[in-house]
Amino acid sequence: MRFSTLEPERMSPAQKRVYDAIVSGPRGGARGPFNVLLRSPELADRVQKVGEYLRFNSSLPPRLNEFAILVNARFWESKYEWYAHRPLAVKGGLAESIADDLARNRRPAGMKPDEEAVYEFCTMLHRQHFVEGALFERAVAVLGEQGVVDLIGVSGYYTLVSMVLNVAEVPLPDGVPSPW
């Protein structure tokens, strides 16, 4: 870990205000990227609000939202992001075999049509930095316009989170094996 742990009693008033907002919200704690982001309290506050919407209030059902997060985590090789969200994806209804294939950097077999749309959309967006017309239309047909916008938001937000985690070298908890 490249950043030391910020203890609440040693935080500036601005850091403490944002920390308190994070731990009292639906996350229940300031894990993962938040110890790092709190170095810039205004950024941390704005980022955590976007993340709260995308994780807890997105128009996408949890199965698809968490699947999109896993696609992003795998693309960025963000082990901590994967560790944090794989159980949530499975709890949300994603088949373990799909997560396992993705962890092996394979196109998952046995995806449902909506999962396939999410996988292809996120993969094309990350690899080619755009989404072709036919795939966009299919995603809108499956997810709706708001769903597509939320999917773009999830991809962008979790790219930022993955970058923070990777640059900070946030480790997996002791005893947790690498997912790849």
Image (cartoon, helix red, strand yellow):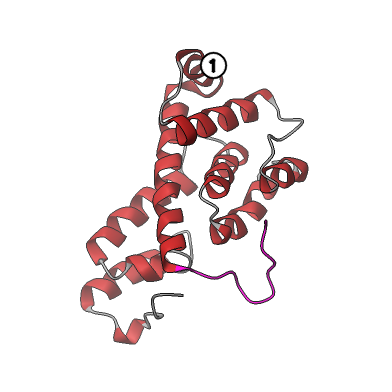
Q: Residue 132 location in percent, x, y?
A: 46, 18
Give the camera-side residue of 87 and 2.
2
Give the camera-side residue of 114 and 129.
129
Three-letter amino acid code at the position of disc 1: Arg
Residue on which the image places disc 1: 138
Q: Is residue 108 left or right of residue 118?
A: right
Residue beneath the point at 53% across and 56% down: 78
Q: Residues within 10 Å of mark 1 (few under 14, many from 20)?
A: some
Residue beneath the point at 52% across and 21% down: 139
Q: Residue 16 location in percent, x, y?
A: 29, 75
Q: Residue 112 location in percent, x, y?
A: 70, 27
Residue beneath the point at 39% across and 71% down: 35
Say whether residue 89 is visible: yes
Give the total of numbered labels. Answer: 1
Q: Quadrant of residue 106?
A: top right
Q: Is residue 143 left or right of residue 54?
A: right
Magenta residues (range): 169-180
